[in-house]
Image (cartoon, rainbow, N blue to C red):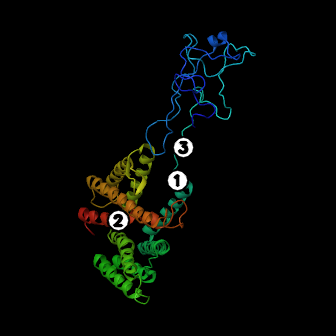
Amino acid sequence: MNDSSWGAPPQAGYWGPSDQGPVQGGAPAGPAYDAHHAQQTRPMPIVPDVPAHGGDQDDDRGAARTGGPLFRDETQPPSTTPPPFQPSSQHPPHPHPQQQPLNPQEPMTSAAQPAPAPQKKSAGRDLGAAIGVGVGLGVVIVASLFVVKAVFVGVITVAVVVGLWELTSRLAERKDIKAPLVPLAVGGAAMVVAGYVRGPEGAWVAMALTALAVLVWRMTEPPDGYLKDVTAGVFAAFYIPFLATFVAMMLTADDGAWRVLTFLLLAVVSDTGAYAVGWRFGTHKLAPRISPGKTREGLLGAIAFAMVAGALCMQFLIDDGTWWQGLVLGLAVAASATLGDLGESMIKRDLGIKDMGTLLPGHGGIMDRLDSLLPTAPVVWLLLVLFVGSG
């Protein structure tokens, strides 16, 4: 508001028309002013003009000062500066007058007004739907995992194919990158089955053949954009089906179902710990340019939760496992899961999207759930092989 607006406070030491100098201790002439009234009217403190509070500033400049009283105590002697509001002589002052602003459209801020209630933090998603979908997926996974192992391999394959479809669709929509889906889907399914049947050697061979199929398939179209399309296709083949193959390889051990369950539990617990601690105590951003919602406190929560869960799982679920191995495993899972989240966040920021899909209410797409699981799978597989062997 500029100086000519209604209700603007007078400048210190100024009273009267603009062509007169400051009057110290004098009262303006006119019938509306009465000396008796001046002794009973409490002057309003003069607040200097300050700039409005900017949206990107962290200080409190320009905010309303409500820490002290708006009017001075009546026991103080009257100021020599005339009050900004002049009551009419036709109405005697009230024993306890209430100063009114000059402009009713812009009421003055009073110290008696209560501070606005703080806004409640929001998770940013439909929490009920997210929990329901998560529980449903957990039931399907656990049932297939402990009934027939081959059924769980089928679950992995379906997740891989859907994830490839989401990724290639977003690449085509946002970047005009046409990674061939058919060879990726066929090769990705073959990769998971080969890893389960033949181990790491089978997974590597299937990966190489899938990359070759992407190169050949893309040759059937015009050469414009060939390099970016096949590069995206090879990246998709490695990022989704190849990393998912390590989950199938965990399943081949005698206690394979418990190894996979440990892997899933640690990933979920790490994500839960990061969310719970970060939502309640998070103040320091972890990677604001990549994922503004992640905090350092959330990372510490993920590490603490995952290490405790890892110690329990290795001690009670894994054959020949010990609690200290679980601490190492939990620390590694928290680190890889966080990096996986940040990696997919980079991809989504580059594409300019919030979620990879809408298949799972409250979660987004399949890829929004696989982001932390995919890079964690080879880490867990390797540490379990080093700790207790591959059998």
The x and y percentages for residue 304 are 34, 48
The residue pinned by badge 3 equals 120
Residue 10 rendering spot, x and y as whole percentages: 57, 26
Q: Is residue 348 above or below residue 223?
A: above
In the rendered image, which residue does mark 1 sit on?
Answer: 124
Question: Residue 306: percent from the left, percent from the top?
Answer: 35, 53
Three-letter amino acid code of the residue under disc 2: Pro
Quadrant of residue 313 within the rendered picture: bottom left
- N-term mark: 3 or 2: 3
Residue 130, image x, y percentages? 53, 58
Figure quadrant of residue 41: top right
Find residue 147 and report its image quarter: bottom left
* On-image quarter of the N terminus: top right
Depth check, front residue: 68 or 33 = 33
Q: Nearer the viewer, mark 3 or mark 2?
A: 3
- Number of the label disc, if any, that sits on residue 375: 2
